[in-house]
Amino acid sequence: MAAHNDTGTRGEAIARKHLEDKGYQILEVNWRYRRAEVDLIASKDSTLIFAEVKTRTGNFYGEPEDFVTYAKQDLMTLAAEEYIYKTSHNDEIRFDIISILFDKFDHYNVNHIEDAFWPGS
């Protein structure tokens, strides 16, 4: 596996543990619908959370969360709509970004951005 894939996999594991430690229930990991993928789908207090995890080993070109493009947001929205339809979810939803930034000593910082975007915004 390529190094960037290893970094992404590590980041997703860290993000998952971060959510679990904060009382979230993980419902799905890498859930796919057509071309769309949602890294983590979780719930807490009857809110359904669709989370994109962005992991980087440096921020020279920007923070990890800066790389969640409008195209990615649109794909997440498409997947979320399908997931909501399939599960008949009727409560609140939100879209989060979990940003993980490693430094040169392999330490990391987690930045959990709740309500990072809303579809179509």
Image (tube, rainbow, N blue to C red):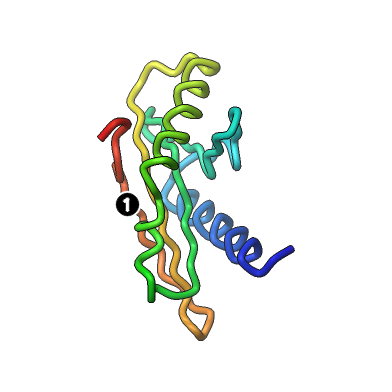
**Residue 79 at x, y percent in the picture:** 50, 29
Q: Is residue 89 above or below residue 58?
A: above
Compared across the picture, whether 44 is left or right of 7 comes to left
Q: Is residue 28 above or below residue 61?
A: above
Q: Residue at x 45, y 64 (%)?
A: 100
Compared across the picture, whether 112 is left or right of 81 comes to left
Q: Residue at x 36, y 32 (%)?
A: 45
| Label 1 element class | strand
Q: How many marks?
A: 1
Question: Quarter of the image holding residue 3?
Answer: bottom right
Question: Quarter of the image holding residue 71?
Answer: top left
**Residue 66 at x, y percent in the picture:** 35, 58
**Residue 49 at x, y percent in the picture:** 41, 36
Query: Considering the image in quadrants, where does the N terminus appear?
Result: bottom right
| Residue receiving disc 1 | 113
> Which one is nearer the viewer's eye here, 52 or 43?
52
Compared across the picture, whether 110 is left or right of 28 comes to left
**Residue 83 at x, y percent in the picture:** 52, 24
Look at label 1 and name its amino acid.
Ile
Query: Considering the image in quadrants, where does the C terminus appear?
Result: top left
